Amino acid sequence: MADTGERSPTSSTGQNFYPERAYDGNMSNFGYAFVFGGARTITFTGFAGDDLPAGASVDGVKILNNVRHFVWSTYEAATFTSVKLSLNGGSAYSSNILSSNQDLSASVVEYTFGGATEDWGLSWSGFTDISDLEVEFISEPADGSGNHYLWTYEVYAQVYYTEAVDTGTTTTGPLQLKNGKLSILGGRLVIK
């Protein structure tokens, strides 16, 4: 199974300060959101890189989020209550991938959502453009009320796919091309 490698987003919404730091490739800085009560929705979109090969079928998508909460003054521990994925730039999202809340650590941890065979319940037929991916995280205070503070260091998406197989056969005289293999059907090959 092939994959795209870890791809960074190119834009984000929902963070109060320095959202670009969550996709600048530098783990020593972060974008952050502070929330006065309730939930916060943070999205990442425009994942950079080459498209999938034509005819490829998506097997799964893995989302990585390097994040921590910060407890200070009236700010409490945080949890992700929802992680969803869109394959069309946010026009429609998958169902929430979490079976239960993902409590966040006070230290930076790389949380993984999805994987090589997780299709997020979406129909990937004809999908090729990685930049159309959008991931949505919803965070809340871990105890269900109060304020929370979230620091996001880096976010990545990795798409796993199977390339299309050409099953055509072409025969020209003693040469046959089948499934990408060249065979000589009698005779000999001379290379000069």
Image (cartoon, rainbow, N blue to C red):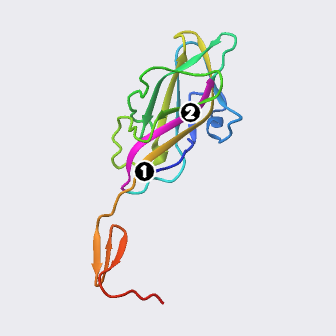
In the image, 74 versus 60, the foreground residue is: 60
The answer to whether residue 69 is above or below residue 124 is: above
Q: Which residue is mark 1?
A: 1
On the picture, is 149 further left or further right than 176? Answer: right
Q: Which residue is mark 2?
A: 65
Q: Residue furthest right?
A: 28
N-terminal label among 1 and 2: 1
The residue under the point 45% across, 49% down is: 129
Query: On the image, which quarter does residue 173 sit in?
Result: bottom left
The residue under the point 65% across, 42% down is: 25
Label 2 environment density (alpha carbons within 10 Å; few <14, some 14–19, many ≥20)? some
- Give the structural element (helix, strand or loop) at label 2: strand
Picture coordinates of residue 14, whole percent (x, y): 56, 27
Badge nearest the viewer, 1 or 2: 1
Amino acid beneath label 2: Asn
Amino acid beneath label 1: Met
Picture coordinates of residue 153, whole percent (x, y): 64, 33
In the image, 185 versus 119, the foreground residue is: 185
Picture coordinates of residue 187, whole percent (x, y): 32, 88
Q: What secondary structure do most residues of the magenta stretch adopt?
A: strand
On the picture, is 7 further left or further right than 17? Answer: left
